[in-house]
Image (tube, coloured by chain):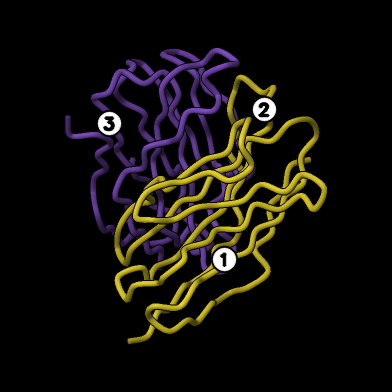
Chain colours: A purple, B yellow
Amino acid sequence: NAGVTQTPKFQVLKTGQSMTLQCAQDMNHEYMSWYRQDPGMGLRLIHYSVGAGITDQGEVPNGYNVSRSTTEDFPLRLLSAAPSQTSVYFCASRRGLAEMSSYNEQFFGPGTRLTVL
Amino acid sequence: AQSVAQPEDQVNVAEGNPLTVKCTYSVSGNPYLFWYVQYPNRGLQFLLKYITGDNLVKGSYGFEAEFNKSQTSFHLKKPSALVSDSALYFCAVRRGSSNTGKLIFGQGTTLQVKP
């Protein structure tokens, strides 16, 4: 298994541009999520999905959209990039949705480093 | 609301000495607690977790963590540090009864092990 993959690894955008960060997993995990990592702030949840067709907001959803048309893919869209969105973005997935599965650990992708000028 | 605090931005320890990376949490109900490690320019890797049962849990690379309910802590420990343990460590908590599984992270602690 490739696990969780993310593309691109690096991206530079100008303010106002839009782009999509790609995330895919081949473990048939139901739960997928996007985090951003900023110095001194840990990881903050942007959006998450509990299955195909179902998404919900996390702690910091503004300026981002997601969709989940398949189990494998969970793209993150920046609608109009702003310098405040300069960050490292991580996609993660975990197995299961039922209450007793919420103890399963998450698997993280390698990250996308985004700079907005 | 759930929260996690890692009170130390950086922990320095000499190789061969024991190490402790501190974590305290706040969550309603029973907590599910996790430790992850991040090496430079890499994603996070799972180290260990506490769900229920024995308060001392053992994980990857010789790490262990002790759950203390009265102190709401989940400190990461290792009896003898290696230079290769130098990395960024994150503690995380999830509310046990939540089936949507939102995981809340601390701000991270940089561990520096010197030869």
| Mark 3 chain | A
Give amino acid for label 1: Val
- Seen in the picture, residue B97 relative to A75 is either above or below; the reply is above
Q: Secondary structure at mark 1?
A: strand
Nearer the observer: mark 2 or 1; the answer is 1
- Seen in the picture, residue A4 relative to B3 is either above or below; the reply is above
| Distance in Å between CA atoms under marks 3 and 2 | 27 Å
What residue is drawn where x is 32% and y is 67%? B40
Q: Secondary structure at mark 3?
A: strand
Query: Mark 3 sits on what residue?
Result: A24
x, y (%) of residue B63? 44, 56
Disc 2 residue crowd, few under 14, some 14–19, many 20+, Cα 10 Å: many
Image quarter hosting the N terminus of chain A:
top left
Give amino acid for label 3: Ala
Identify which residue, A74 or B41, lies in the foreground: B41
Are dots 3 and 2 on a single chain? no
- Seen in the picture, residue B100 relative to B112 is either above or below; the reply is above
Res B96 label? 2
x, y (%) of residue B31? 69, 35
Are dots 2 and 1 on a single chain? yes
Identify which residue, A76 or B101, lies in the foreground: B101
What residue is drawn where x is 27% and y is 23%? A27
| Distance in Å between CA atoms under marks 2 and 1 | 23 Å
Disc 3 residue crowd, few under 14, some 14–19, many 20+, Cα 10 Å: many
- Disc 1 + disc 3, Cβ < 8 Å: no
Query: Mark 1 sits on what residue?
Result: B21
Disc 1 residue crowd, few under 14, some 14–19, many 20+, Cα 10 Å: many
Give amino acid for label 2: Gly
What residue is drawn where x is 55% and y is 58%? B76
